[in-house]
Amino acid sequence: MVVHNAVPQNNLNAMVAAIWQFLQMDPEDEEQWYKYKPYTKDDRCSPISAGGMVEIYMSPAPAEGGIGREERIRCWQERCLAANWPGDARGWEHVHQKPAVLTELGRKLLGVDSWN
């Protein structure tokens, strides 16, 4: 299944760049494209899974705007649903909760604070 325009193009470009950076590879250097063999159940030293997935956890939020940063921050502050996120349609968090208190790392991951 292909879902066209599921992610804004600038967010997609930022994620692709983050994957190349994480793998420490240059997308323009074809000799690096097959630098890693996918890991197996016996050898899990590769950053690439057998299905071709790269697992990146706690990646910085994209610095540029788009639906990413501003929308995430607004939804965190107002406890509301993002336009493209199903969530709880009843709005329970918006009515009954205060914004989550974020740690320094949480503020950076959300995009409130810069990583620099």
Image: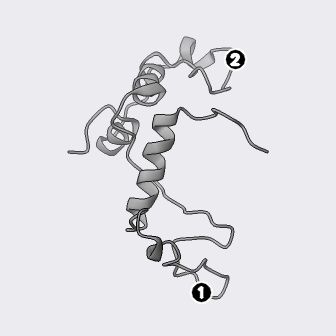
**Residue found at x 50% / y 71%:** 33
**Residue found at x 49% / y 58%:** 56
**Residue found at x 41% / y 69%:** 29
- How would you rate the neighbour count of disc 1 (Cα within 10 Å): few for under 14, some for 14-19, many for 20 or more? few
Q: Is residue 110 visible?
A: yes
Residue 18 position in % (x across, y down): 42, 53
Please tell me the numbered disc located at residue 23: none
Q: Does residue 101 sit above or below 1 in this rendering? A: above
- How would you rate the neighbour count of disc 2 (Cα within 10 Å): few for under 14, some for 14-19, many for 20 or more? few
Q: Does residue 87 sit above or below 91 in this rendering? A: below
Camera-nearest label, 2 or 1: 1
Q: Amino acid at mark 1?
A: Asp
Instruction: List the residue tagged with mark 1.
Output: 43
Q: Amino acid at mark 2?
A: Ala
Q: Quadrant of residue 38?
A: bottom right
For this orientation, the residue located farthest to the bottom is 42
Q: Quadrant of the N terminus?
A: top right
Disc nearer the start of the sequence (2/1): 1
Please tell me the numbered disc located at residue 89: 2
Residue 64 position in % (x across, y down): 35, 33
